[in-house]
Amino acid sequence: MSEVLVLVDHVDGAVSKPTLELLTLAKKLGEPSAVYIGPADKAGDAAERVKAFGAEKVYVVDDAATKGYLVAPKVETLQQIAEQAGGADSLGGVLVVSNFEGKEIAARLAVRLGSGLITDAVDVADDGTTTQSVFAGNYTVAAKVTHGTPIITVKPNSANPTEGAGAGTVEQFTPTISERAKAAQIVASQPRKSTGRPELTEAAIVVAGGRGTGGDFAPVEGFADALGAAVGASRAAVDSGWVPHSYQIGQTGKTVSPQLYVANGISGAIQHRAGMQTSKTIVAVNKDEEAPIFELVDFGVVGDLSTVLPAATEQVAQR
Ligand code: FAD
């Protein structure tokens, strides 16, 4: 079976759920090998985690050589691992999480390996055919890389991570990073202030607010906190400067697929739906009973969010 490289997405060694989804999909294409580029002291835990989800091999790369730079050193690292594994003609594929950094890495790697690239896949079949949901979810495209090894970025929440231990053989890998790759350096970075809430794309419950909040997200946040949920937003709320862009759900934001999605003061524009329509249960609070969001909800509340949400929060708090 050919080796399939999975770039491990993590925060300080804590492996993200989308990485586990990639490992699940990688098993369809061949033998998953996880590539961990991160702090050496967290490598053991990360390796155990990816092993539990099927990694046969774990390449451990100390991020001392890549830290402080943009993506180029990571691309060189992946390229060298790919070449060691036999190059584009031998590899079964390379899977990367579809986020801003992942997409840039995948694109640069595709150029270096002379391989085809597919971005934003929502599924990968055994024969490498991917599914993409395009034009705000109006069309489903089946596409396949026909040259080199398939390099695929997969949107978070595209698969259910399936446990099943792989061999998890750890191989320390020391890349040779060129001076050129170090040409752009990060001069300052500021960690995002932690809200203490779950990560939006990984949360089981998402409570989102739109223009209908009028800029007051307190009722949305209060309800989210009562439920232990993540807070999301429509683009209208983000463009108004009420919440950061990292909250945006939709075509040009994040894709979420929680067990429960609660849309508050959100009309349900097609670009918003593109990022939340696969949620398992959808609830909307909107004062306009004609709002398009009501076409796709499981439960709808016609009412003003500034009264409905505090009442709902109180009910939840009493349980
Ligand atoms: P509106 O459409 O203005 O709806 C506000 C809703 O709040 C209304 O239904 C109203 O009845 C209700 N309301 C008002 N007051 C209250 C109240 N007190 N209580 C309860 N309900 C109330 N949008 C996204 O969300 N994500 C994207 O990623 C995205 N990408 C886009 C990409 C492109 C290329 C384009 C062209 C657009 C994109 N949009 C995106 C924008 C999208 O088309 C809509 O404009 C946006 O989703 C509208 O946000 P909204 O529902 O919050 O606002």
Image (cartoon, helix red, strand yellow):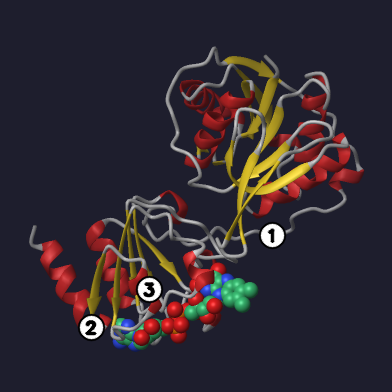
Residue marked by disc 2: 303
Label 2 CB-ligand 1 distance < 8 A: yes
Q: Nearer the viewer, mark 1 or mark 2?
A: 2
Measured as percent of width and height from the top left, residue 101 is found at 68, 51
**Quadrant location of residue 31?**
top right
Report the disc number at residue 188: 1
Residue type indicated by callout 1:
Ala
For the C terminus, which image quadrant? bottom left
Q: CA distance from mark 2 to mark 3?
A: 14 Å
| Element under disc 3 | helix
Left or right of residue 6: residue 317: left
Verify CB contact (< 8 Å) between mark 2 and mark 3: no
Left or right of residue 122: residue 301: left
For the N terminus, which image quadrant? top right
Comes first in the chain, label 3 or label 1: 1
Res. 221 visible in picture: yes
Task: For label 2, count other residues whose C-alpha is less than 10 Å away and answer few (under 14), some (14-19) or many (20+).
Answer: some
Residue 75 higher or lower than 34, as above or below: below
Determine the residue positioned at 56% across, 63% down.
138
Res. 71 visible in picture: no
Determine the residue positioned at 54% across, 12% down.
167
Residue 72 higher or lower than 233, as above or below: above
Q: CA distance from mark 1 to mark 2?
A: 45 Å
Residue type indicated by callout 3:
Ile
Report the disc number at residue 293: 3
Q: CA distance from mark 3 to mark 1?
A: 41 Å
Q: Nearer the viewer, mark 3 or mark 1?
A: 3
